[in-house]
Image: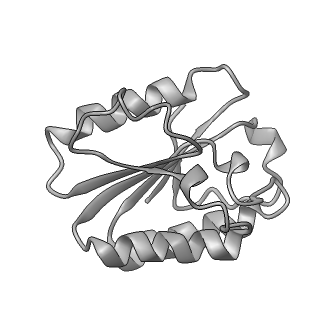
Amino acid sequence: MVKLLVGHKGSGKTKQMITLANDMVDTSHGSIVFINKNSRLTFDLKYKIRVVCMEDFPHITNSDEYIGFIYGIISSDHDIDTMFIDGILKHADVSLGNLPEFIERLKKISEMFELDFIVSLSAEMEEMIGVDFEGCEVLN
């Protein structure tokens, strides 16, 4: 399932994601991955959470490459239970314009590999024109 945390910058989405990820460590039966733009959250997350900093992968420049990157992470660990993506609109040229397609692709990956995505977006629901929220859960 794709779970969304929406709201403008400064509304506490990242802090909520950190809390969710850290709480999940004790109950998860698989691996947890947290994708962030930079390494500043590394010490806020429990050591069992795999943190991926997108600054370490500057050649991922569009949503197709980003989806391929997600497939690569999944192929390296078949036990991933949950993948957090913090601030997706700051990653790899993902924008409100191509967000509907990106969310649909995440839904398919989620279903295919039986894992959850928790994605934060610096936008309001009304701004996400064209996004099909069926099969998604809005957490806030």
Residue 11, horizontal then vertical, whole percent: 64, 20
Residue 49, horizontal then vertical, whole percent: 28, 45
Please say if 133 is above or below 73: above
Residue 99 lies in what quarter of the image?
Answer: bottom right
> The C terminus lies in which quarter of the figure?
top right
The residue lying at 75 percent from left, 37 percent from top is 123
The residue lying at 48 percent from left, 24 percent from top is 15
Please say if 106 is above or below 43: below
The residue lying at 64 percent from left, 49 percent from top is 88
Please say if 115 is above or below 112: above
Q: Judge left or right: residue 91 versus residue 49.
A: right
Residue 20 lies in what quarter of the image?
Answer: top left
Relative depth, front residue between 66 and 81: 66
The residue lying at 51 percent from left, 76 percent from top is 108
Residue 5, horizontal then vertical, whole percent: 56, 38
Residue 77, horizontal then vertical, whole percent: 27, 71
> The N terminus lies in which quarter of the figure?
bottom left
Relative depth, front residue between 91 and 129: 91
Please say if 120 is above or below 96: above
